[in-house]
Image: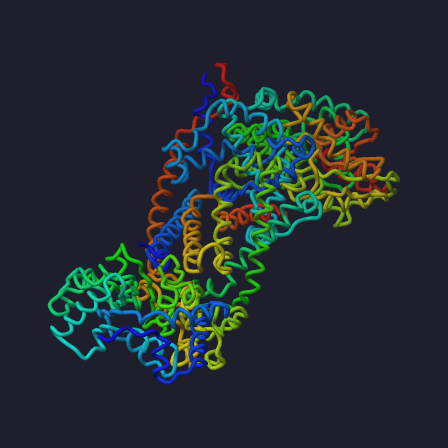
Amino acid sequence: MMTSIDFLSWVRGPVFIMATAIFVFGISLRLLEIVSLRRKPDYSAPRGSRMVGGMRTLFSRSMYDKSTFQRSAFTIVAGYIFHLGLFIVTFLSVPHILLFRELFGFDWFGLPTILIDAVTVITLLAMLVLLIHRLKNPVRRFLSTFENYVVWTVTFLPLLTGYMAYHHSVFPYPLMLGLHILSVEILMVVFPFTQLMHTFTLFMARWHTGANAGHRGIQV
Amino acid sequence: MSKPQSIAERLSNQGFNRRDFLKFCGITATVMGLPPAVIPQIANALEKTPRQSVIWLSFQECTGCTASLTRAHAPTLERLIFDHISLDIHHTLQAASGEAAEQIRKQAMKDNQGNYLLIVEGSIPIGNPGYSTIAGMSNKDMLMEVAKDAKAIIAVGTCAAYGGIPHAYPNPTGAVSVEELITNKPIVNIPGCPPIPVAIAGVIAHTVTFGTLPELDSLKRPVTFFGQNIHDRCYRRPFYDKGLFAESFDDEGAKKGWCLYKLGCKGPVTSNTCATEKWNAGVSFPIESGHGCLGCSEPNFWDAGSFYKALSVPTGDFAQTAGYALAAGAAVGVATGLLNKKKKGDAAKNHETVTINDLDRKQQ
Amino acid sequence: MSAATFERGYKAFKEQIDAPIAAYFSSCVSCGMCAEACLFFTETGDPKYTPIYKLEPLRKVWEQEYTLWGRLKALLGISKKLTDDELAEWQELIYGSCTMCGRCTMVCPVGNDLVYMIRKAREGMAAAGHAPPDIIVGTQRAITIGSATGVGLPTLQAQIRRIERETGMKIPMDVQGVEYMALLSSMEIMSFPEYLEALAKIMKYAGKTWTLSSEGFEATNAGVQIGVSEIAKELVMRIVKAAEKLQVKTVISPECGHAYGAIRWEGPNLIGRPFTFRVQHILEVLDEWREQGKLKTEGFEKARLTFHDPCQSVRRGGVIEQPRNLLKMVASHFVEMEDHGKMNWCCTGGGGVGAIEEAHELRTKAFNRKKTQLDALKVDKLVTSCANCRLVLEDGLEAYEMEMPVMGLTEMIAEHLKEEGEMEKDKGLYRFSEN
């Protein structure tokens, strides 16, 4: 019989290794797939710097002009809360930092658990609200494919199980912790083959757009 | 053997008065997590019930569990209970040996057929039974024989409950727990390496008092003692919530008594009562002494990763795996990159010039 | 003779996909923000006009041809292959409801350049024979006659003669060794010859030597519009050859934003080498002279007016401050629209949409965006710097029964030139006549 501790050991051990392997393999494959498609050189006389433009757009796309903000206020605000929350919970929670320390060999400051807990709740709510928006908003519903909902689910579950583990909801902590880790592993496996890749590729996308505009002397 | 006496009779023979007896009942109730209202019921039961016959078998074990129970300083509950059960046979403690000892066991089984409690300490080697035998009999055979007529079985210690250290990888003896062999008897697991004495005593007291086994969880552990994890009851918990951690065993945080999570404490996944009952007559428990919980009362705790790695850190060498995966991903990525380049190149090479006569479908 | 086939189109899609395209498609999370930046969506509320959705055919090719995962999905039948019917259905989305204005590119949070993608998608569509008939005809005219609207050299010559007769100014043609070679958009030749007149006036005023070329005067590029690089290249080569033959230093793109992008940014890439001459937008030239003090104006437009930014010269072209600097010289009541400059809203007729008959109704509906912008400002006059925008704006204003004159910025500057500048006149003209 597999006890919850056995389950926890299993997801902390072999499953995590497998998930890491698929995650890292998939990402390096996907990034190389993109880069290897290359792009043609631009022969037009530059008016500005590709480098400056590219660097600029890496950041500028996180800010919005007034009219765009007004038109998409909901998506922007909820999206911001969700992404920031996810970042804080993922990278500033002490147990997570220990995991990264194991991989990278260095660590950074973590936030008190109570704060992480609060941020998790906010992030979960933001995600729920974004899901409702995806289902209700004509454009988002129209654009959404099965993949969008898969991606939402595999992102939502680690947050939810993490929250439940901390609060010992439904199952005892060891089992819930195991489920939490498993849900992250599912996320890792799904990651390279879905839109979740935008985490990395958005920098490439912003760079290309910014560099092209920079070349033309436009700040985008 | 003399006629079984009730606990009350024994107590009064030993010079305890009624007041002491009720106090004892009160402690029993508290330990079992029962309301004060049941104290009279406990008193009543103990006054009338004859002493419970107990057979204690020791298999692949280190005697730590017995030591845990007997080291208790008088006059504790466990001591009282220990004095007031009829421990008919205990492999480690009894004076008799050899054939005589076996005779005693058989006699006790016969006298209390269907009524005795069987306490097992240690795991049972079934891979190679030769690793542990008693009087030429394998542990498994003895367990099956004694269990047959037992009222209930209490597996004391992690070895009996889950296989324990003998069961740890690569498990050379093929050690298994009691419940892996016995499926037709009520079993109570009291894991721990060793288990907390009060838990052993409390379960026996409950069995004697109510004639039934206490409420158990899915791992057959008494909920009273194993219903909560160490972490939730730990006096260092506030530091965890505040994010204050000892980074090493001798840093400022360690001296200030901060949370030991980062040093590998398994308190969050360990269900036990150490943080409240404590050890050595309530003096301390591992975390209070400055070391993280090893999770010794959990199944397979020995194989659940390093004692000194935080719970959130994967147990395997995933950094190395990541390295290999990166290399493999890069290799396949380069390969697909080349394929893509060829595909795109072919499309370009076979490009048919589009003139103004090629813009629509009909032949111009 | 060959004909367009689905296979040719599919091959063209494959050829077009590059690293930016792959990064863009990998990054989209279907947030839908691009819809809110597209006036075909904002004014109709129909989600099919969401910019990224218009790129679905290109996305399919990318996923199924250039990703391991996508190839697997196609192999297992999880994703469906691109079909010819799909391309036919997408014609309306890739041509009829995308002006390539690039406003979506400005708001995409992951930074996708959707116009870059549309431009490439059109290559596949055109090769597959799914370009709209109106655009095909225009492209054929550009090659055979000289421009998409059917305006050729004889028309230009007729206009030149008329201007020379009416103003007494000389419009130089095929003059070698001059500093500037000016290009024109056929719409300017046909509908707004004032531009050419203004240009001649300003050149004379600034004392610059310039010429037109009878072999390469048309600046618009139907090949870029329809998405056929070979045709676009042929059209660009006309200009390159003319400029190199006449040994000019600078080629001046007319106001038309599309023309500017086609020659300034796409041109060298179409021919596969840098130009040997400089390309400047007319407003860049004028602003440069303003800065150098060579352009002095007098008097102000009294009307309350605003400026419509042509997407291709502003957002996609980088000529943003120049029109404002120039307008401030001659307009005392210049006000900006709420979304202006890089964030302007398209006139609804760019990217070839203005030429597609079938798109007319939708375009008129979408013009409501511009109307809303103009209504908010309560202006009496609209200035722009693109012949195509100007035609579309006039059309839209008429459809919404709005009385508002639309003016070209270059003409406005020409009208306000300060008198003493005339001194330069003789010197300049004299030099021309010597050549």
Quadrant for residue C143, please give it.
top right
The vertical placement of B140 against A205, above or below, is: below
Depth check, front residue: C60 or A36: C60
The x, y position of residue C127, in whole percent, is: 49, 25
What colour scheme was applied to this rendering of the protein?
A: rainbow
Q: Quadrant of the C terminus of chain C?
A: top right
Please say whether residue A12 is visible from this viewpoint: no
* Residue C190 placement, left or right of C145: right
Please say whether residue C243 is visible from this viewpoint: yes
Q: Quadrant of the N terminus of chain C?
A: top left
Depth check, front residue: C207 or B357: B357
The x, y position of residue B352, in whole percent, is: 43, 26
Furthest residue toward bottom: B15
The vertical placement of C353 against B38, above or below, is: above
The vertical placement of B332 against C142, above or below, is: below
The x, y position of residue C271, in whole percent, is: 51, 35
* Residue C360 placement, left or right of B33: right
Q: How many marks?
A: 0
The vertical placement of C385 against A9, above or below, is: above
* Residue C387 placement, left or right of A211: right
The x, y position of residue C167, in whole percent, is: 81, 29
Quadrant for residue C142, please give it.
top right
* Residue B275 placement, left or right of C219: left
Depth check, front residue: A176 or C116: A176
